[in-house]
Image: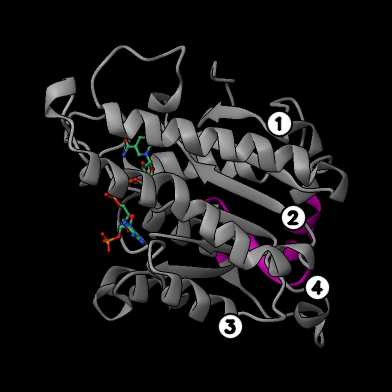
């Protein structure tokens, strides 16, 4: 990510321009689908992004923002029937529990043959909140790792065929500054370790798939006001989603394996 890049030079910039050329008129943060000539929209289909945990919080805001900007959004939720805010956006919504192998298999099977340009592994939990050694509950820590570390890995494994046939081959894993060892100021032992493990999975995959043109990044969305945090947090979900959108749509090969905050600043491992 180079903040000085224009969208013209970015990998996704081309897609954004293609989206604009295909008849999606971008007006500030809102895009208006406008039919133009013939089937250009079909010849130049919008980029496809799959967002996990999209029924609330940052995932919901990201699904909405990418949709508003002309992306084809596949949003997943554990309980799609209850995801009323997500349904109101009007994007394709699929069931996914990232800890459930049957749910993962159903998603994989339902998406067979469909290109995915960007996979955004957003789903996560705060998990076990104990901080003192004597209070740590191994079974609860397993759950935290199951969601925050292994969950993303399961989705990547399942959707790798879709990513291979996607144009952008970009995987964004929603980490946290709290996954940084350098930034560890204590507390939230399980959450920090689970995001640290996610960071390391991301690094390994960035190396394994580098020569195939993939970009794997871990991002910190800022301290955002959601059910996971508190009203005192810095950013609204919309502000975080806007900054993340600008960052994600500017990613290029040089960003492979990197760890950024929402403004594109590198975070120490
Ligand atoms: N908020 C922050 O300040 C902050 C800071 C740093 C990093 N993050 C990261 O950003 C991501 C989104 O956080 P948020 O604040 O938006 O959290 P949130 O409001 O609590 O939303 C979490 C989302 O993850 C989903 N989820 C949880 N377990 C899941 C599972 N097993 N399978 C599928 N989906 C599951 C939830 O679905 P249900 O509704 O079904 O539970 C929900 O959609 C997380 O990875 C989080 O760690 C957040």
The residue located at (37%, 51%) in the rendering is 146
Q: Determine whether 170 is above or below 50 in the image.
A: above
Of tags 2 and 3, the one toward the viewer is: 3
Residue 206 location, quadrant:
top right
Q: CA distance from mark 3 to mark 4?
A: 25 Å
Residue 108: where, in percent of width, then height? 58, 76
Residue 12: where, in percent of width, then height? 74, 50
Q: Which residue is mark 2?
A: 169
Mark 4 nearby-residue class (10 Å; few <14, some 14–19, many ≥20): some
SS of the residue at dot 1? Answer: loop
Q: Is residue 124 visible?
A: yes
Q: Mark 1 vs ligand 1: CB under 8 Å?
A: no
Q: Which residue is mark 3?
A: 109
Q: Nearer the viewer, residue 9 or 198?
A: 198
Q: Is residue 30 magenta?
A: yes
Image quadrant in which the C terminus is located: top right
Of tags 3 and 4, the one toward the viewer is: 3
SS of the residue at dot 3? Answer: helix
Range drawn in magenta: 13-31
Q: Is residue 164 magenta?
A: no
- Please tell me the numbered disc located at residue 251: none
Q: Does label 1 or label 2 sit earlier along the sequence?
A: 1
Mark 3 nearby-residue class (10 Å; few <14, some 14–19, many ≥20): few
Q: Which residue is mark 1?
A: 1
Tally of marks:
4
């Amino acid at each position: 990510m180079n903040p000085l890049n224009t969208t013209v030079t970015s990998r996704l910039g081309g897609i954004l321009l293609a989206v604009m050329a295909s008849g999606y008129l971008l007006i500030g943060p809102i895009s208006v689908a406008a039919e133009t000539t013939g089937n250009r929209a079909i010849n130049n289909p919008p980029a496809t992004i799959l967002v996990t945990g999209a029924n609330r919080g940052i995932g919901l805001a990201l699904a909405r923002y990418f949709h508003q900007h002309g992306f084809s959004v596949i949003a997943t939720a554990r309980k799609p029937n209850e995801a009323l805010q997500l349904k109101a956006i009007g994007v394709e919504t699929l069931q996914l529990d990232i800890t459930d192998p049957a749910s993962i298999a159903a998603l994989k099977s339902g998406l067979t043959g469909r290109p995915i340009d960007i996979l955004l592994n957003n789903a996560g939990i705060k998990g076990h909140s104990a901080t003192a050694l004597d209070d740590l509950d191994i079974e609860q820590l397993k759950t935290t790792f199951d969601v925050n570390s292994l969950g993303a890995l399961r989705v990547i494994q399942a959707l790798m065929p879709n990513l291979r046939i996607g144009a952008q081959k970009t995987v964004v894993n929603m980490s946290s500054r709290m996954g940084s060892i350098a930034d560890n100021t204590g507390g939230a032992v399980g959450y920090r370790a689970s995001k640290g493990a996610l960071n390391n999975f991301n690094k390994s995959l960035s190396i394994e798939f580098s020569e195939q043109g993939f970009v794997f990044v871990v991002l910190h969305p800022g301290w955002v006001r959601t059910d996971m945090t508190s009203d005192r947090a810095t950013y609204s979900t919309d502000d975080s989603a806007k900054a993340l959108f600008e960052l994600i749509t500017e990613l290029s090969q040089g960003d492979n394996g990197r760890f950024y905050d929402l403004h594109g600043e590198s975070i120490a491992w």
